[in-house]
Amino acid sequence: MNKKARLATLTLAAVMLTGVAAGCSSSKNEGNKGTSSEPASSASASPASATKDPYEIAIAVPVFGAVPKDLPAVQEEISKIAQAKMNTTVKIIPVSIGAWGQQMNLMTSGREKLDLFFEFGQGYSADVAAGKIIPLDDLLNQYGEGIKNQIAPEYLNSAKINGKIYGAPVYKDYTTGVPGVLMRKDLVDKYQIDVASIKTIDDLDQVYETIKKNEPTIVPLGAGLTLPSDKYVWYDKLGDRYGVLPGYDNDLKVVNLFETKEYEDYLNKMHSWAKAGYFNKDAATSQVGGFELLKADKAFSYFIGLKPGNLESETRAAGKELVFVPLMSDIYATTSDTLGGLWTISSNSSNPERVMMFMNLMYTDKDIANLFIFGIEGKDYVKVTDTSIDYPEGVDSKTVGYSFQSWMYANPSIAYLMKSDHQEMWKLTAEANQNAIKSKALGFAFNSEPVKNEITALKNVTDQYVKGLETGTFDPADKLPEFRAKLKAAGIDKVIAEKQKQLDAWAAANQK
């Protein structure tokens, strides 16, 4: 990617830099010095002997909102399938997302009964280092053939730390998505906006001016909690942004993003938009997502890295028909994109062989997938076609007795689709994963332990400045030099040097 293209890409997508990082901080990293537990038993038993005795698998999952009332019935039906196939039952342990970190720390630090749990990518490396989860390589080879068939080697191997796989990534789109903007179709039609003429972020100036002039109660660009993260721009953030890899395919030279001319140009663009009134005034502090602002008739558009099925799901969330305008065609795959969530076996498990067998079912058994994601047929959903479903009559997403965040399930591609979903989304997902431009550092993850104090100091600085700068609230002429100086004082150069050292070691070990 040449300099001009990088600049254009950064400028169009850098508005996506704030928000919830979907990132992951771990994968194959030869520099990781953490220790880990070995499996409680080896993966050498035959399938017949491994299922001889009954076993109950305790599975911890995050719950967003109230515990579904139909969870006991779902658990019972899953147990029936697992009992018939592998002499196993399951106990699903729901944990409120608000208490997830604390509760999982208690469960894994003690010797509480726990076999299998969902792992957020950002906690993966730390749990490996703490010995809370076990390496899976031997277990995958003996009992995880379905997992290995589902996830391409370059993505499965991205979960390696010190040469071992400790978690199976959730099957999903592993790419950045196509950077672009989602707009309300009613307003696009009302003002006859020619979306085909929008090729770059600069082309939005006239569009936003039109909305600002004619819709005084609606901001042109909704900014807040769920602005897409920085993974959509022209660099691989290498787990965080304290040292990045420009262009994905460069010479593996780590640079300071915040010192680049491209970053400064982007901030100036955002500040010009803020002065023009194109952002909501609380953009730097808002905890409301872009789709929520559209739904409340407070915004016209928001930025996104669009993946297969996103347009349909975002339309449902916003409650309005949306138009997507791509601002870039290339999609990339990085370690952070791959490891948004994983399934891991707890070091507390007394039968990891059986747990791996069940994990394999989660990636291959359609009946278990549908139960886990959608609940009981006829009660929580009804079939519309052989492959699509809907809520039963009189039931909706708020009143249904069971729900589960499908993005957390091991392999949602084998389950039904809601009738409002893009019915080709999993075919398109497979194509995106195959065709994505792979970052040269795909499979590397930074172990921040050697510079943990500096990382803490840097986070304090970025928390103080980044969102204000990247939503245009702060004037870059005033605040950017101050921001850069404080990053220097907090130790960003030391962090970049350590990241470069680890990346060099990883590249040598993997012949990059």
Image (cartoon, rainbow, N blue to C red):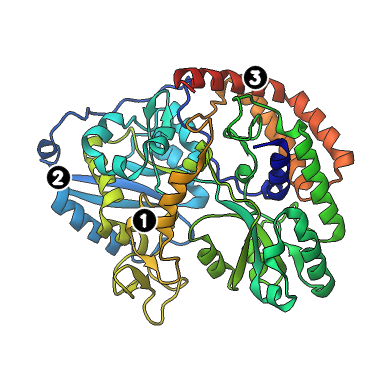
Of 436 and 54, nearer the camera is: 436
Could you tell whether 157 is left or right of 453 in the image? Answer: left
Tell me: residue 132, above or below residue 385: above
Q: As shown in the figure, which amino acid type bears the numbered disc 1?
A: Ser
Q: Position of residue 420 (x, y in %)?
A: 45, 71
Residue indicated by mark 1: 413
Tell me: residue 424, above or below residue 159: below
Could you tell whether 270 is left or right of 301 in the image? Answer: right
Could you tell whether 18 is left or right of 146 in the image? Answer: right
Quadrant position of residue 196: bottom right
Q: As shown in the figure, which amino acid type bears the numbered disc 3?
A: Ala
Mark 3 or mark 2: which comes first in sequence? 2
Judge the density around disc 2: few (<14), some (14-19), many (≥20) Cα neighbours within 10 Å.
Answer: few
**Disc 3 to disc 2, how far (Cα)?**
52 Å
Residue indicated by mark 3: 497
Disc marking residue 54: 2
Which numbered disc, 2 or 1, marks the residue closer to the eye?
A: 1
